[in-house]
Image (spheres, rainbow, N blue to C red):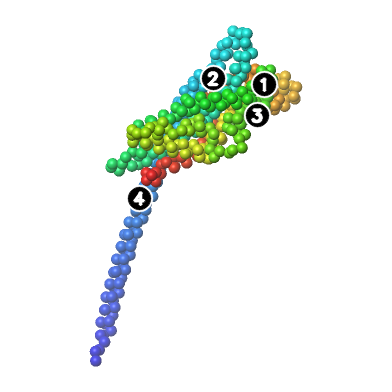
Amino acid sequence: MVMPPPMSQNSEINNGLSSKKYYLTLKRVYLLGKYGQKKIREIQEREAAEYIAQARRQYHFESNQRTCNMTVLSMLPTLRDALMHQLNSESLTSLLKNRPANKLEIWEDLKIISFTRSVAAVYSTCMLVVLLRVQLNIIGGYIYLDNAALCKNGTTPLAPPEVQQQYLSSIQHLLGDGLTELITIVKQAVHKVFGSISLKHTLSLLELEQKLKDIRKVVEHKDSDQIASYSPLCHYLMPDEENPLATQACGLTERDITTIKLLNETRDMLESPDFSTVLSTCLNRGFSRLLDNMAEFFRPTEQDLSQNGSVYSLSSVSLPLAKIIPIINGQIHSVCSETPSHFVQDLLMMEQVKDFAANVYEAFSTPQQLEK
């Protein structure tokens, strides 16, 4: 019969086992602690890297918006010169100084040209602001991705400098053929609204506002039963047909293909409901600012105030159309001003424009864009 070990021996065995378990437990706790520290450090490093990347992207975005603003201001003189060249009211005012026999006929031409010039200036300036926001934020997103990928050897740039230049040159459509077509449509609308109104006919500021709304209805096809999913004004921003590069049967370089891709992405953006909403909001603000500028000339005289008991309303002062013509004719210098005027600053600082720009940049500066 085997005798059990003495109690002291059992105690030693149990103590040994307990010590081993305690040691193993301590080792596990230590290893788990080291592992936990490593994971926490990795999470902290990843969060720090993400924060730095986000801060870098935010800085790049804000810098890009300043570039947008400066680009708009730098292009306004070109836009103004193009408008004044195609709608040369100065030649008509010079003729009137010589008291010609066809004075009335010249005044009628001046009426149409003066209103066309200012209305077209509002449209084209708003279009320039929003179109450049789209183009420069698309290209800005690609530039950000290119900069982020510089550390990767052999990475092909998404938007090399020559592609950027070729792509951004498409703005010339708005300053060229697009502007000419816009002027033609606006001129037809102005003639429809003002053509039969006598030069002696008086208009209040409220009545003038209504006339401008009537012109907008014609230009923007707002009387049409067919509701388009995108703004009809897109036609003046980019040609409807494919870019001439795309029509070439052969000989397209890699640069051409990339440019065509950018132009197609831009066209998709211009045909989006968001773009239509933002452009419409800009136009509302633009025409409102135009009327604010005009209101300075519709102030009542002391005689008007005394007759109406110092009560003044937008309909209390009326001016003959002949006096309104030179006022509206001069508004182009306020609308298309390269020195930040209230008109242009209103458009550049609008929250809707800023939010839209942020959405475009976000869409084209995410790493997923690299995978397309």
Name the quarter where the C terminus is drawn. Answer: top left
C-alpha span from label 1 to label 3 = 14 Å
Q: Secondary structure at mark 1?
A: loop
Q: Secondary structure at mark 4?
A: helix
Residue at (49, 33) in percent of width and height: 130
Of marks 4 and 3, which one's residue comes earlier in the chain?
Answer: 4
Of marks 2 and 3, which one's residue comes earlier in the chain?
Answer: 2
Residue 154 horizontal side relative to residue 73, left or right: left
Q: Of the numbered discs in the image, which one, if any, rests on residue 210?
A: 3
Of marks 2 and 4, which one's residue comes earlier in the chain?
Answer: 4
Decide if residue 67 is in sight here.
no
Q: Residues within 10 Å of mark 4 (few under 14, many from 20)?
A: few
C-alpha span from label 4 to label 3 = 61 Å
Judging by the rendered image, the residue that carries numbered circle 2 is 87
Task: Tell which tag, 4 or 1, sits nearer the viewer.
Answer: 1
The quadrant where residue 247 appears: top left
Of marks 4 and 1, which one's residue comes earlier in the chain?
Answer: 4
Of marks 2 and 1, which one's residue comes earlier in the chain?
Answer: 2
Q: Secondary structure at mark 2?
A: loop
The quadrant where residue 53 appears: top left
The quadrant where residue 282 appears: top right
Taking the view exactly as shown, the residue that stands out farthest to the front is: 249
C-alpha span from label 2 to label 3 = 23 Å
Q: Residues within 10 Å of mark 2 (few under 14, many from 20)?
A: many
Q: At which x and y percent is residue 3? A: 25, 89
Q: Of the numbered discs in the image, which one, if any, rests on residue 24?
A: none
Is 38 drawn above or below residue 315 in the view shown? below
Residue type, mark 3 in image: Gln
